[in-house]
Amino acid sequence: MNPVPRAEKPEPPPGTSDPEPASTTTPAAAAPPAPLPAPGRIRARVVGLMGPAFVAAVAYVDPGNFATNVESGARFGFLLLWVVLTANVVAMLLQYLSAKLGIATGRSLPELCRERYPRPVVWGLWFQAEIVVIMTDLAEFIGGAVALNLLFGLPMLHGGILIAVASFVVLAVRSARHRRFEAAITALLAIVAGAFLYQTLSATVAPADVAGGLVPRFDGPASLLLAAGIVGATVMPHAVYLHSALTQERFAGVREPERGTLLRAQRLDVVLAMGVAGLVNMAMLVSAASLLHGTGAEPTLHGAFSAFAEGSGPLTALLFGIALLASGLASSSVGVYAGQIVMQGFLRRRVPLWVRRLVAVIPALAVLAFGVDPTHALVVSQVVLSFGIPFALVPLVLLTRRADVMGEWANRRATTLAAAAASVVIIALNVVLVTLAVPSL
């Protein structure tokens, strides 16, 4: 591993400047201020900023979301639709804060944690973040392997190997050019969205049932556990780390007058990307509720595939399998990239992406080789991921509220309170998830 060059000193907060030697030039002879960029150039920079949120949004439609949404719809119908909607709205706020952090500071969240916190804290944050990334990769590989098994009858281990090879190709696209990587990931996300849009439109859904699912309520401890699982599968720690780095990369060369425009563009990027992810998650639950609930179908990915084929035709089942495959491939590639961001930010160390890919493959292939039940493995991975949520959300909220870190882009008090309240609720639900799920593992 080679050390990453130490980051340059952050820019001074807006409204201040580095001390300079006194000038003997008279005010009249002073150089005029640089002209603001033309509107067309600003619009070009805005367009150039779009895309990072769609990469981060892949974490919100990964195989863990498939498992929780399908099980929720199959067991409880539309009951927990409001949880999916609420979780994705909260995710919009948190991902925007992460994106804003990268643009306003020129640093990723792991880098800022290294700069601001004691070394023992930094090492602890790095260690748990690596565990989060490993569990993320585990879930994505299993989801992709399940998809290949459903579509082609391929053994799980062979499917996991193919997903690993395919993810190398996607990562090679990123190495060639960032925009191509974002385009490839967005295309995979579009495949997932299109598949569930078709499933939802082909199902017979009563508007009154959907409206009833938007009323907050539970139906016993089992529904509460699933609600916690939905939130745990939605707000992913690695996506929070990753988004700040994605926008940080776009920050290079941006002048201060342009930054406000770019931040507004990033807000739009987040709303669009997370809006798509939220609609996909809701479509998953709606299609599962309309096609599986009350049929006695097994509330697993394999059970859903069979039930879709029997109840709505082979095309619906095929699209479900294709969507799961696209989700596993896209999210596994994004997960490895997030792992690089974590190590580079917390430790200032970097390893080649292909090395990280090989390291991530080993635990997943071991699980598949030993024949562990894939649904059970997905549940275990989501429980472990729950432990990592506070270590990403708490530093995010604390740092984005500080004027000495964010300058004039520090959170307003209302934004901080909303983000803090959302973080507390998410952490509490994940404590419920861990408490109820661990005894049954």
Image (cartoon, helix red, strand yellow):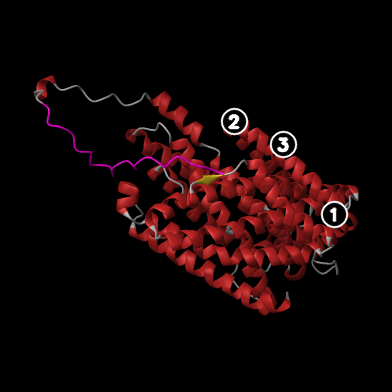
Q: Is residue 108 left or right of residue 323?
A: left
Q: Position of residue 129 (x, y in %)?
A: 56, 58
**Residue 12 falls inside the magenta stretch:** yes
Mark 1 secondary-structure assignment: helix
Residue under label 2: 177
Q: Which residue is mark 1?
A: 156
Magenta portion: prevailing SS class:
loop
The answer to whether residue 148 shows anywhere in this view is no
State which quarter of the image contains the N terminus: top right
Q: Quadrant of residue 299?
A: bottom right
Res 441 seen here: yes
Residue on which the image places disc 3: 169
Three-letter residue code for mark 2: Arg
Residue sitting at x 75%, y 45%: 164
Q: Is residue 202 magenta?
A: no
Quarter occupied by the C terminus:
bottom right
Residue 288, by quadrant, is: bottom right
User: Does dot 2 land on a helix, a strand or a loop?
Assistant: loop
Where 33 falls versus 76 (above or below)? above
Q: Amino acid at mark 1?
A: Met
Q: Which mark is residue 355?
A: none
Closer to the camera in the image, 368 or 252: 368
Badge 3 or badge 1: first in the primary sequence:
1
Task: Give the magenta range.
Answer: 1-23
